[in-house]
Image (cartoon, rainbow, N blue to C red):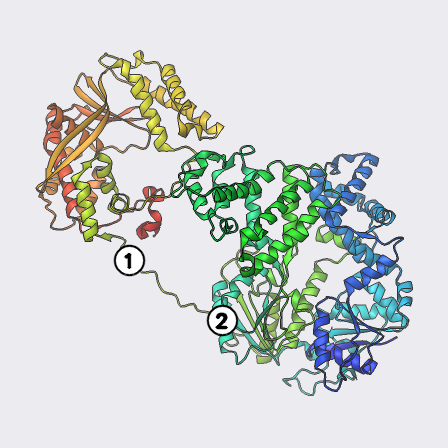
């Protein structure tokens, strides 16, 4: 039996393997088989053999195989007949039949998920565990009495896990079916017979650090037969039985013990004796246990607050590097690929990692389509926000008719219409089409309808995986048709690869399996599709295999690089947290002899330390401030245990603890520029002045003046610019529409009562509520509300209107919806002020103007009318300065000028000063809130209407006409709901 060859992890692996192959076979590979853990290793080995000097060319290369493909072929040969490989859905279907049969035999089958909708997520987990048992060549066994440790369905399944595993295997064998795990298990079970088939071959198993149980059994049989040589990449101390081996190679040491084998260190393809260090401070690594220290490496650590800081440091490091040959950027998380692409140099860059399909724009389109069905009111009635998201997706807007992309304009018009409609919309209705600026062609309308039918109608009534797969296939056909996509997929290669994976992997999994015609709930079907998409990756293969490489940690297996950059080296990413398994949590895995978190951590440690020992320069970048986005990630990230190990090695070499920021640790300081507290006020330019003058020459309402008084900057955006707030569907009800409905109801209710002397006893709260409900039934805003919203609005309206009717004092309604207008001189300018009084009453004290309010009401303090000094200051203002303090005082004292304006307008236009003006607060109690109140002195009231209110209005008009800028007036409650908040810097502070 041959000794295990250990290639020191300070050497490049594939070059050492090539030298060993030549030394062991004298360059004759005609009867040689080389087995690697992964497929891409064949390319690297062939390149090394081609570059070897002294090796005659041309030559017959050795047979090179990945262990998965090789073992699957061996295992399949031991099946009774050539097996048919099952995909994951077929496995779930078989397991479902088995679990149902076992549940029938069980005394208490209640916890078994015998309904497919309940079983499906457990079936996916169970299928994975069956594969694990096969891969590790261990039998399943029942795990009883786990209630309370796992969920009830998991406890039921685990209690019969041995029976499920045995029946599953028996059925696969009986029906001529197989899975990759079963083929590997069959090869391991028949290892001796399989080894005999290769008795005349020379075999090399290269790069296996922690193989599965089945792989170990197969390799052990071949090794004991004497024609297999194993080549490992690891700590050379493995060759010293008494030496202290690096902890990342403990599994290799244990495997040596299981085989009763010895290891030798290889140098130039031949065994070499290990030697000891002559001095503890010697900077070079030698072949002994002290090789575990990394003091000979050039180590650099960059500590930043977040990913942006790391990217800045990485970009600087790449720019300062003398060359990028034999350099790798290691990304522990595939989500880092996209931001890293933006800082890479534009030459000699190769990416060797899979991009998750779930992160692609195609997955977002699919998720949007599924969300449309999940949030629909009923088939054909979709939520407007999800529809807008669909219309905005670039894949649909790029569809072409000839050389044009007409859906951009059509979808823009549709979005505008959707934002003005109800919460749930029929996208095929004329209302949803909106008013197109340019009438679309018939071909464009046909393409629009096809796109909507493909994304909406096709997914409405799916009941089986086959139907869902057909709907997804229709989406692929829509996007791939040459006449509709043009050259888009030639320009967007990542998207094209994702679409290819969807069409060739996900769709067949849905349409071709045993579950294809099973009727399943919609939620189960959509979960199935999401799971299949989450499992798919768009692979990237580097070409050529030189220059700067961007890889994930798994993609670095067996590779070595002279210069390493490891990005985001935090504990949550490197090694990362173990995924949660609801069926078989980590503490239970040892009961089945399956690898647990400890072995997973050893695999991660081996992969990263093998990289470290093979490099000359190691740069690690990590964050200490910004948390990650993962559900189980720590709120504050901590640097990876591997970073701590390297720092400890460096501190041991220096003999002291490193201070923060002391080399080789660098603190990344981003160039922080304080956000200037710029004046948010908008200056009055000639164009603004012209627009302001035009506004003042028109009809001026109380709303106009209140807007300026509340916040001049908001007034500027609303009246003096073309800016308009983004139209949104008021799903919880439109307050303005409710106000209009309440006003119309009260006008109709009081019309028959004009001229009559009435009080609360003369009003029927029930009749008023009935009238509101009747008018609401024909109101578009009311119809747009969901059913519960309509019910709540009617009930609230009955209560509020009933309270108003019950609080009505003795009065005589004189007029409804009365138009009032009068001219007021302000700084030599005659301004036309207007208003509309909801109701004018005559009461014992005189005329009272009534205004209904469905929103908040802010009153005016009664003592303001007696403050002659305040009104004198208002009268003395002539516009020589903006006087912001005076405007602020006026805004505080008069939250609204509506009632004062109405009083003055009535007096000026009708010749009779009102006795009072009141707000009727419909939002709460329905009571009246007067402007003056019964305690106000009549003479003071007449003075206020005749002189002080005009002084207030004239001041506002003069201030508006002469203002040199429009300054914000921040107020937390008002700013939170301001439509112009994004444009206002003051409101954001």
Placement of the N terminus among the 4 image quadrants: bottom right
Q: Residue at the location (21% across, 51% down)?
A: 687
Q: Residue at the location (83% across, 57% down)?
A: 185
Q: Residues within 10 Å of mark 2 (few under 14, many from 20)?
A: some
Which SS class for mark 1? loop
Is residue 92 among what the camera can see?
yes
Q: Earlier in the sequence, mark 1 or mark 2?
A: 2
Which residue lies under the disc numbered 1?
A: 678
Is residue 267 shown above or below 882? below
Left or right placement of residue 978 versus residue 697 in this view:
right
Q: Residue at the location (78% across, 84% down)?
A: 272
Which SS class for mark 2? helix
Query: Mark 1 near mark 2, Cβ–Cβ under 8 Å?
Result: no
Is residue 925 shown above or below 65? above
Q: Position of residue 620 (x, y in %)?
A: 56, 70
Q: Nearer the viewer, residue 221 or 571?
A: 221
Which residue lies under the disc numbered 2?
A: 315
């Amino acid at each position: 039996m041959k000794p295990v060859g250990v290639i020191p992890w300070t050497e490049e692996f594939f070059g050492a393997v090539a030298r060993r192959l030549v030394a062991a076979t004298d360059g004759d590979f005609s009867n040689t088989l080389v087995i690697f853990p992964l497929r891409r290793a064949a390319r690297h080995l062939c390149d090394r053999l081609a570059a070897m000097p002294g090796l005659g060319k041309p030559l017959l290369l050795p047979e090179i195989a990945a262990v998965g493909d090789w073992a699957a072929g061996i295992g399949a040969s031991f099946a009774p007949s050539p097996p048919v490989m099952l995909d994951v859905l077929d496995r779930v279907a078989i397991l479902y039949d088995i679990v149902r049969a076992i549940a029938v035999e069980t005394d208490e089958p209640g916890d078994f998920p015998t309904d497919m909708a309940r079983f499906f997520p457990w079936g996916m987990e169970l299928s994975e565990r069956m594969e694990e048992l096969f891969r590790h060549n261990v039998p399943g066994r029942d795990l009883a009495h786990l209630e309370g440790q796992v969920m009830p369905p998991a406890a039921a399944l685990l209690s019969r896990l041995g029976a499920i595993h045995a029946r599953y295997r028996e059925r696969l064998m009986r029906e001529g079916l197989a899975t990759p795990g079963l083929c590997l298990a069959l090869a391991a079970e028949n290892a001796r017979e399989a080894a005999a088939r290769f008795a005349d071959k020379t075999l090399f198993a290269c790069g296996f650090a922690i193989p599965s149980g089945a792989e170990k059994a197969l390799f052990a049989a071949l090794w004991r037969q004497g024609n297999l040589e194993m080549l490992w990449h690891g700590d050379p101390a493995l060759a010293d039985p008494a030496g202290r081996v690096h902890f990342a190679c403990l599994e290799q040491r244990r495997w040596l013990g299981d085989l009763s084998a010895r290891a030798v260190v290889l140098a130039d393809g031949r065994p070499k004796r290990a030697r000891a260090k002559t001095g503890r401070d010697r900077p070079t690594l030698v072949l002994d246990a002290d090789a575990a220290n990394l003091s000979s490496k050039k180590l650099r650590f960059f500590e930043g607050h977040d990913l942006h800081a790391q990217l800045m440091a990485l970009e600087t490091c790449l720019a300062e590097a003398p060359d990028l040959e034999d350099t790798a950027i290691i990304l522990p998380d595939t989500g880092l690929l996209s931001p890293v692409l933006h800082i890479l140099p534009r030459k000699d860059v190769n990416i060797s990692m899979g991009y998750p399909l779930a992160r692609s724009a195609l997955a977002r389109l699919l998720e949007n389509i599924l969300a449309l069905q999940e949030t629909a009111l009923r088939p054909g009635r979709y939520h407007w926000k999800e529809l807008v998201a669909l219309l905005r997706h670039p894949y649909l807007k790029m569809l072409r008719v000839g050389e044009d992309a007409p859906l951009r304009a059509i979808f823009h018009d549709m979005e505008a219409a959707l934002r003005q409609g109800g919460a749930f919309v029929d996208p095929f209705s004329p209302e949803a089409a909106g008013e197109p600026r340019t009438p679309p062609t018939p071909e464009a309308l046909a393409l629009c309808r096809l796109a909507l039918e493909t994304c909406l109608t096709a997914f409405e009534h799916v009941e089986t995986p086959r139907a869902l797969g057909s709907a997804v296939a229709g989406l692929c056909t829509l996007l791939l048709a040459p006449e509709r996509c043009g050259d888009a997929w030639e320009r967007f290669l990542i998207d094209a690869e994702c679409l290819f994976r969807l069409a060739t992997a996900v769709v067949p999994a849905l349409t071709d399996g045993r579950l294809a015609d099973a009727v399943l709930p919609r939620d189960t079907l959509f979960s199935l599709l999401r799971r299949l998409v989450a499992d798919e990756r768009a692979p990237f293969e580097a070409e050529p295999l030189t220059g700067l490489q961007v890889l994930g940690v798994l993609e670095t297996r067996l590779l070595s690089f002279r210069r390493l950059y490891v990005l985001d080296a935090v504990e949550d990413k490197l090694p990362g947290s173990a995924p949660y398994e609801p069926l078989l949590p980590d503490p239970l895995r040892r009961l089945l002899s399956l690898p647990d978190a400890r072995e997973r951590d050893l695999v991660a440690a081996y992969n990263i330390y093998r990289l470290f020992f093979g490099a000359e320069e190691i740069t690690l970048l990590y964050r200490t401030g910004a948390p990650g986005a993962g559900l189980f990630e720590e709120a504050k990230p901590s640097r990876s245990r591997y970073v701590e190990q390297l720092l400890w090695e460096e501190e041991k070499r220096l003999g002291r603890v490193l201070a923060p920021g002391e080399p080789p640790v660098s603190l990344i300081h981003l160039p922080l520029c304080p956000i200037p507290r710029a004046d948010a006020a908008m200056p009055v330019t000639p164009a603004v002045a012209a627009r302001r003058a035009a506004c003042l020459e028109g009809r001026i309402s109380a709303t106009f003046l209140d807007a300026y008084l509340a916040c001049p900057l908001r007034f500027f955006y609303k009246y003096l610019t073309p800016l308009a707030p983004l139209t949104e569907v008021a799903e919880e009800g439109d307050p303005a529409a409710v106000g209009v409905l309440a006003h119309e109801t009260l006008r109709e209710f009081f019309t028959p009562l004009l001229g009559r002397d009435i009080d609360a006893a003369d009003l029927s709260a029930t009749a008023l509520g009935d009238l509101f409900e009747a008018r609401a039934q024909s109101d578009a805003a009311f119809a747009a509300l969901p059913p519960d919203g309509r019910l709540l609005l009617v009930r609230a309206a009955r209560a509020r209107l009933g309270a108003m009717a019950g609080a009505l004092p003795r009065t005589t309604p004189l007029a409804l919806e009365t138009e009032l207008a009068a001219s007021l001189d302000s700084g030599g300018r005659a301004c036309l002020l207007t208003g509309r009084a909801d109701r004018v009453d005559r009461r014992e004290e005189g005329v009272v103007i009534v205004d209904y309010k469905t929103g908040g009401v802010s009153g005016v303090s009664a003592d303001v009318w007696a403050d002659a000094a305040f009104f004198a200051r208002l009268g003395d203002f002539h516009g020589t300065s903006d006087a912001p303090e005076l405007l602020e005082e006026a805004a505080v004292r008069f939250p609204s000028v509506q009632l004062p304006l109405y009083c003055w307008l009535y007096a000026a236009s009708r010749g009779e000063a009102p006795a009072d003006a009141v707000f009727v607060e419909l939002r709460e109690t329905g009571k009246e809130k007067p402007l003056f109140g019964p305690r106000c002195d009549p003479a003071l009231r007449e003075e206020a209407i005749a002189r002080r209110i005009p002084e207030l209005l004239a001041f506002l008009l003069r201030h508006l006409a002469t203002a040199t800028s429009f300054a914000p007036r921040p107020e937390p409650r008002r700013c939170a709901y301001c439509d112009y908040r994004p444009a206002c810097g003051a409101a954001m502070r």
